[in-house]
Image: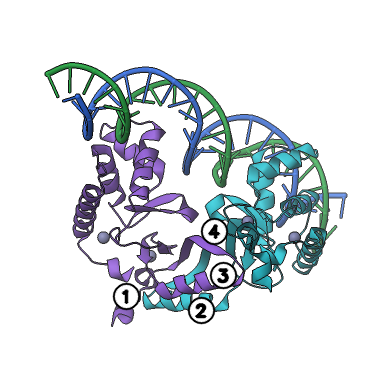
Chain colours: A purple, B cyan, C green, D blue
Amino acid sequence: MSEEHAHNHNDCIDTALATAETLCLEQGQRLTKVRRRALELIWESHRPLGAYQLLAKLAEEGFNSAPPTVYRALDFLMNAGLIHKVESMNAYLGCAHADKEHKGYFLICDECHNVMEFDYQDIHASLIAKAAQHGFELRSETIELTGLCADCRGLANEVRA
Amino acid sequence: MSEEHAHNHNDCIDTALATAETLCLEQGQRLTKVRRRALELIWESHRPLGAYQLLAKLAEEGFNSAPPTVYRALDFLMNAGLIHKVESMNAYLGCAHADKEHKGYFLICDECHNVMEFDYQDIHASLIAKAAQHGFELRSETIELTGLCADCRGLANEVRA
DNA sequence: ACTAATTTTGTTATGGTATAACAAGTCTAA
DNA sequence: TTAGACTTGTTATACCATAACAAAATTAGT
Ligand SMILES: [Zn+2]
Ligand SMILES: [Zn+2]
Ligand SMILES: [Zn+2]
Ligand SMILES: [Zn+2]
């Protein structure tokens, strides 16, 4: 995860939360305490967080501990475009580009479990074209790639050079 | 699902089972009764089948009705490359190209729930390249597209013309 | 401020997906 | 034939997600 490596992750969190505030304000959505805290907790790392892991963290802090609490927060955050669900992991990840309309394409490290979101217009266009060849009208895309990230390959320097 | 439309689906099943027999023989794997029947049941349609749906069908036919029965069969069939898991649906689909090394790329119809598997070397190459740009070594790909198939758009004729 | 409508949260219950752990049976090859 | 490997049976449990309805809080109109 070279882009995310050796960075001040507090910046990630601060930016994400500031973006969330702005977006919710613009769209007349309410970023309530539990929603805001859920988003912060998801952003604690670049690893996707399971719904029940999140629920446990929220419960520790005095929030209600029944599943609907966390799924409601997750639904809200997903609808607002502030997080993505990683289908292959049944887990949730903060979105770093919430202010731009986009699909979530993910690179998932099998070793450290960090996930990098990437955007790739070329692939998106290719997929639309490919689907059209089959008479298929594309609506949504789940693109989740796994493998080894740069750090886990020990190649961070070479690659970034 | 224009390619799959108006076809004799028994051919799909027969071909899939014959391929399974051959592959298992070649690889010294045992296609036992429950595994074989599970594969047939998954191939009953081009719609992915949930593990518990499959379990119910097997149970009706006198197979053991505990979850490990079905998950073991599914694990076997997936390892043998005879089926794929559709992650975004938590469901399993017969693979029509089990004899070729490939990734499963899927077009999933939101309306009729049929799934078409497609292969797309260009996209595969693009993804490897894109991953490499991030220092990432690709191991597996989950590509699941949803939308409307040709039949459900009522465009089968135009597209196939 | 008062009230009604809307949204959010609390609560209980249930359904759907998947695996751990260990025992028993079956197949295969020496 | 017997040991080892593989497969299946069985019980229990963990994890993921939603339905349904009640209560509380927020918002908007008066
Ligand atoms: Zn970060
Ligand atoms: Zn890694
Ligand atoms: Zn068919
Ligand atoms: Zn369709």
Q: Mark 3 lies on which chain?
A: A
Disc 1 Cβ-to-ligand 2 distance below 8 Å: no
- The residue wearing badge 2 is B125
Q: Quadrant of the N terminus of chain B?
A: bottom right
Is residue B33 shown left or right of residue B126?
Answer: right
The quadrant where ligand 3 appears is bottom right
Is residue C6 shown left or right of residue B43?
Answer: left
Query: What's the distance in space between the residues labelled 4 and 1, CA to CA?
Result: 38 Å
**Amino acid type at mark 3:** Ala
- The residue wearing badge 3 is A132
Instruction: Determine which quarter of the picture holds residue A99.
Output: bottom left
Q: Mark 4, mark 2: which one is toward the viewer?
A: 4
Q: Which residue is drawn at 36% across and 56% down?
A: A47
Per the rendering, the mark at residue B147 is 4
**Amino acid type at mark 1:** Ala
- The residue wearing badge 1 is A156
Q: Position of residue B105 (x, y in %)?
A: 58, 66
Q: Position of residue B87 (x, y in %)?
A: 54, 54
* Pointer 2 with pointer 3, Cβ within 8 A: no
**Amino acid type at mark 2:** Ala
Q: Do labels 4 and 2 share a chain?
A: yes
